[in-house]
Amino acid sequence: MSARHRVFVTRELPGDGFAALRDDPEFDLEVWPEDVPPSREALLQGVSGVDGLVCLITDTVDEVVLDAAGAQLRVVSQMAVGVDNVDVAACSKRGIPVGNTPGVLTETTADMAWALILASARRVVEAAEYVKDGEWKTWTPTQMAGIDVHGATLGVIGFGAIGQAIARRAQGFGMRVLCWNRTQRTAEAAAVGAEQRPFDEVLSRSDFVSVSVALTDDTRGLMDATAFEQMHPGSILINTARGPIVDEEALVDALKRGHLGGAGLDVTAVEPLSMDSPLLTMDNVVVLPHIGSASMATRSKMADIAVANLRAGLAGRPLPHSVAVAVGR
Ligand code: DGY
């Protein structure tokens, strides 16, 4: 029998694929047992001498990690669609394919964008806390009054699969949908009743601006002070993509000045968000702990794909899903 494949997995994973991998005699798995990610030191130690690495968005996989792993490393398999934590170029240079998990999380993430749209517009979290805090004394004409979602304009920044799924849902709310994308997506936009427009126009005409671009050098800080100034007064920012796409200081400023009406953020520039963040003191901001794809079914499918990518890479076959460079979500 040939040597067993040594693999480091940076967290316990759900799903049947991972359970089967654990039982597979051809694999020698080391699984990081804690919920918090391995420290840098533990990661460097864990990858030493492995043939395969299964990682999450919380693990920085750079040249140092690749060096620590060694020349026998044959595949990096990330359980996420976004791979901004992985130095894909460095992997490619070494001939190491990088797997990701697109497709299966599209609808689940779009659902979450909508949870944030509705929660922010109708003050759902704030109102639920109001009840829990015993503040609910009566009914008044303007108590917890928010803004309407139906009939409003939704701007989608980034019109890949997730952006399109977010836009499709807007039809049920009778919304006008504008979208911006780096490349032409006219047909995709038309298919979901949206209209592709320039970035500035999407910002200035939308009541809700939902971000769904991948994090790259080009999109880091895309939503900055200038962008917030272009958004019209009272409009709401939604981000289910990556925190660093938004300049958080500029966002806080726009919210404090009352220029923006609120924000629904599934992601933050630094995760977890510091308890000192001014965002946590604002009633019109909903912050979630990066759970856009977190349904059990979807997370299990993502893990299954990550395992399939790992197996393919170790067998020297093309990965079912891989990224050559960090592009579109
Ligand atoms: C991803 O897949 O990139 C999400 O952020 C985590 O599901």
Image: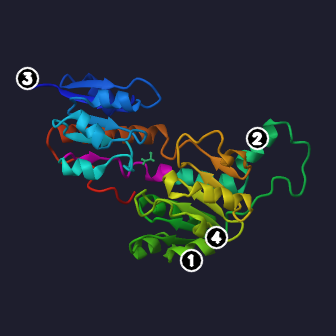
Q: Nearer the viewer, residue 247 or 33?
A: 247
Q: Residues within 10 Å of mark 2 (few under 14, many from 20)?
A: few
Position above or below: 328 against 34: below
Q: Which residue is mark 4?
A: 229
Which quadrant holds the C terminus?
bottom left
Query: Mark 3–mark 2 contact, CB under 8 Å?
Result: no
Q: Amino acid at mark 3?
A: Met
Q: Which residue is mark 3?
A: 1
Q: Position of residue 121 (x, y in %)?
A: 70, 58
Q: Position of residue 135 (x, y in %)?
A: 86, 40
Looking at the rendering, the stretch of residues picked out in magenta corresponds to 96-109
Query: Nearer the viewer's eye, disc 3 or disc 1?
Result: 1
Give me the residue at 56% from left, 61% from top: 210
Q: Which residue is mark 2?
A: 129
Cα distance between the residues tagged 1 and 4: 12 Å
Cα distance between the residues tagged 3 and 2: 60 Å
Q: Position of residue 4 (x, y in %)?
A: 16, 25
Q: Identify the disc placed on residue 201.
A: 1
Relative side of 289 to 56, left or right: right
Q: Position of residue 62 (x, y in %)?
A: 31, 43
Q: Amino acid at mark 4?
A: Glu
Q: Nearer the viewer, residue 12 or 96?
A: 96
Relative side of 46 to 288, left or right: left
**SS state under label 2:** helix
Q: Amino acid at mark 1?
A: Glu
